[in-house]
Image (cartoon, helix red, strand yellow):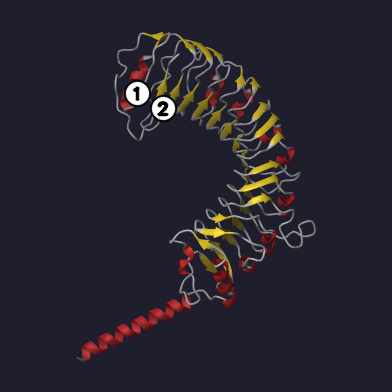
Amino acid sequence: MTLHVLSCLFICVFALSFLVTTLVSLPSRRLDQVESLLAFKNEFALSCNKSVTNSWSRDAISFDGVSFDEDTGGVTELKLRGACLSGTLDANSSLFRLHQLKHLDLSLNNISSSLPGEFGRLTELEFLDLHQNRFTEELPSSISSLGLANATVLTKLHFLDISNNSLQGKVPGWLSNFPSLTAINLSRNSFDSFPNNIPPTVKYLVASNNNFTGEIPLSLCNPRNLLVLDLSNNSLTGSVPRCLSDKMTVLNLSHNNLTSLPDTFSNSSLRLLDVGDNQISGKLPRSLVHCKSLEFVDVQSNRISDTFPFWLESLPNLKALILRSNRFYGPISSPPYPFAFSKLIIIDIAGNMFDGSLPPNYFVVKQIGESYSFVDFSGNRFEGEIPESIGLLNKSGLKISIINGSVSKVSPCRPQSVPVPKTSPVQIRLSI
């Protein structure tokens, strides 16, 4: 009996100790911040039953998606990504009473309103993600009640994502007033022009799938450390500014109406160059050989008239070379230039005017896991024999589809029917 009593006493003491420890370790919460959170929740209808805000109440032990400052009790993080919020975000929203907010994520909801300038009241904000909502109309000329013409308010903001909304007009000039901004995503809106200044601190700028027209603005040359620029799927015209060829890691200008590339590329950090689906003419710049980090080159669907770029074989990391639907011509093999693209796994030269025979060593399988994943030589003027090395691809278990044109006398070691493993979705086309 005594042992049973002692056991119960021990359990009670342990449970009480655990409870006290838990309560002490919980961050303090100011009552006004809790009231603001609950008021903000009530501003929206919930479009599903699994909203992260379901745990919120005055006596809740935890607020899912919310972090509080341990010293002041103020809300510092509000992560409501995909929280099923449906409604409007008004200028008098309780959100703007959370003045200690550093991280705000309202992405993947159904918030439909103009973008309030009152975000400027959240002066501690470092991270703001509003992507994939239904924000509409032009952005406010200022993002603070004081106006950015007279004050710089969001001095700590380094990440801004307002992509996948219905915003339109000119990208506002107040972006240049954010001295810490390093990443901007404006994609999938209806913006039509850039401001005269881009923050010099920006490293990542994505503005694809908008309505930008005219030439690429030289204001994009202002950021000293711009690493990633994506302006794809717009209606930009003219030449690619030379300043964009000397400092990028990723440069995606595909699906525009650009007409020429800079003659000089001196960027040893460039890893991806995509200028496909434009109206670029002339030759492929030989200075690309200086871009020793290049892994992906796509110039498809342009008007480039040139011979096969054997000289690119000097790039040690090149994995994808896409030249399709241009005006390339001549042979793709030459004794002075053995095909030594050691890392290449994608080669697409379809729809050009290449001629001659297919080199026998083009399809030699490399080490396991490094063989080709896409090869398309169709729509050219090749003749002669299909290389025996194609048959060696059988060792990788890859399906090979060849439609015979002027290329004839298929090598006897070519596999007739090989199943395609799910891990190796390889396509090879050699049709004429």
Could you tell whether 364 is left or right of 296 in the image? left
Query: Which mark, residue 372?
Result: 2
Percent across and percent down for residue 120 are: 69, 61
Q: Amino acid at mark 2?
A: Tyr
Q: Residue at x 65, y 55 (%)?
A: 115
- Kind of element beneath mark 1: helix
Q: Amino acid at mark 1?
A: Leu
Name the quadrant of the N terminus.
bottom left
Specify the quadrant of the image occupied by residue 113.
bottom right
Where 80 falls versus 422 (above or below)? below
Percent across and percent down for residue 137 are: 67, 50
Camera-side residue: 415 or 99?
99
- Kind of element beneath mark 2: loop
**Residue indicated by mark 1:** 393
* Disc 2 to disc 1, C-alpha distance: 9 Å
Bin the neighbour count of mark 2 within 10 Å (Cα to Cα): few under 14, some 14-19, many 20 and up: many
Q: Residue at x 41, y 29 (%)?
A: 373
Camera-side residue: 390 or 184?
184
Q: Are marks 2 and 1 in contact (CB under 8 Å)?
A: yes
Could you tell whether 399 is left or right of 300 in the image? left
Q: Residue furthest left?
A: 1
